[in-house]
Image (spheres, helix red, strand yellow):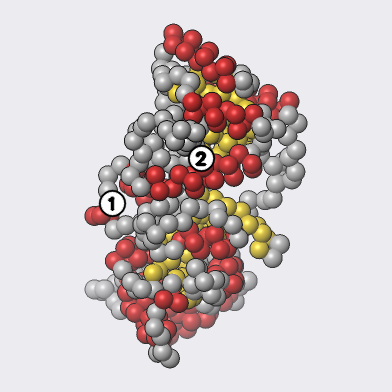
Amino acid sequence: MARKPILALVGRPNVGKSSLFNRLVGERLAVTHEIPGTTRDRLYGETFWNGVTFQVIDTGGIEIYQPSGARDESPLAEGSADFIDEIIEQANIAIAGADLIILVVDAQTGVTAADEAIAEILRRTDKPVLVAANKIDDIRQTDEAYDFYGLGLAAVFGISAIHGLGVGDLLDEVVRAADAAAVDLEDEPDDDHLKIAIVGRPNAGKSTLLNRLIGEDRAIVSEVAGTTRDAIDTDITWYGETVTLIDTAGIRRRGRIEAGVERFSVIRAMKAISRADLALLVIDAELGVTEQDEHIAGYIIDEYKSLVIVVNKWDALDKDAFTMNSFIENIRDRLHFVRYAPVIFISALEGQRLHQVLEVAHRVWEWRFFRIPTSEVNRLLRDSLDRHPPHAKGVKRLKFLYASQVRTDPPLILFHVNDPNQVHFTYKRYLENQIRAAYEFEGTPIRLSFRARDERKPNPISRTEN
């Protein structure tokens, strides 16, 4: 399979890059807000046009300082002024890794000094560059796009990212530009690989962990809680295997999620969990397990994703011989519903025990695909019933007729019973514990399903099957 061409969207803040990104990928993946500086990290998605699938990169706005020290006067998102250099660096990384570039400008504002400065940067690249003059909400306004030919770049397209006006023509030219540039597309690896979402409360050290794992400053790191707002993907190679790391915005407890930007960030973090195989729940060792951590673990289990608990900032604690065991006991008590999840202690900042993160994650991922032979499932069921038969409800007694593991990723075990309504949740938990006693399924949830079956049919539970 050929590698997908990479298309980067760049431009100064508040010109509509994120709106165009959302239009192209068909989902609300990028945070959009009228305040410049909202999109801080590179953000990835895909779009398909005329038989070609593109990987699209949204970038933070490139804030250009003029020689006099002046710049386009526009309010920055709160705290964004602290990240100007990092935003520029993120955009430059995206440009360097792109096959094609779209410079997004504001047709209503017209050509600005910042647009000219960015165009000068792009002219020095050897990449095809197109200009999207955004915010043209009426076809009669398309003449407003012509002034941008003065930037000295390739074709200019008047578009409305919000309404979709002119976006098709822009994509037609993107496909032609990719073909004309003879983009070198090597084979793309299969998508059947480990995908890890790095989640946790704000400022727990998720971005620092990501940067350590990939060996470069992939995500902006700051002491200000909530720096990472977008879920961003990075592919790495680990012992010859592809692993996708998904860094996400810090997740606050629901009652404390602010309206607007942060709320959309949390929604994307939830979506990141849903498209991952496994989540690393990063806990701040200095704070211990918080209510937010409990909520996040609940989200992970609701999606039936595997889980590894990563206690970060372990170097910051004064420790004795009992500290680690006490911490684990506290985790098991607060997160009692995921007692099967392994716990590792690291310092992302100091690089302590980082090798354990991917080692444990990969081992847990393999358990998602483990299948118990049918004969063994039924043996476990017989032994469990002998040790602790289910209590009867009224005059009708619960009978187990047959069981088998019907799928993996995550493991699903189907029990045929005479009446599913007779299965109490405590007996479900008992059966799961018996299964885990025989097969660890480390860090991986097990789904148990109970289906009614006519008990007059032959009962195969006593037979040996493969």
* Disc with the residue nearer the chain's start (1 vs 2): 2
At 44% from the left edge and 48% from the top edge, which residue is drawn?
83
Screen quadrant of the N terminus: top right
At 63% from the left edge and 39% from the top edge, which residue is drawn?
98
Q: Secondary structure at mark 2?
A: loop
Q: Is residue 431 left or right of residue 370?
A: left
Residue found at the far bottom of this picture: 321
Task: Say what amino acid the circle numbered 2 marks.
Answer: Thr
Q: Considering only vertical position in the picture, is 120 above or below 226? A: above
**Gap in Å between the C-alphas at discs 1 and 2?**
24 Å
The residue that label 1 is drawn on is: 257
At 54% from the left edge and 34% from the top edge, which residue is drawn?
9
Give 347 or 342, whichever is nearer the viewer. Answer: 347
Q: Is residue 263 visible?
A: yes
The residue that label 2 is drawn on is: 59
Query: Dot 1: within a 10 Å radius of its alpha carbon, few (fewer than 14), some, or many (20 or more) residues?
Result: some
Q: Secondary structure at mark 1?
A: loop
Task: Say what amino acid the circle numbered 1 marks.
Answer: Ile
Expressed as whole percent of the image width and height from the top left, the position of residue 309 reads 45, 70
Give 120 or 321, whichever is nearer the viewer. Answer: 120
Observer-side mark, 1 or 2, equals 2
Expressed as whole percent of the image width and height from the top left, the position of residue 256 reads 25, 54
Expressed as whole percent of the image width and height from the top left, the position of residue 444 reads 49, 68
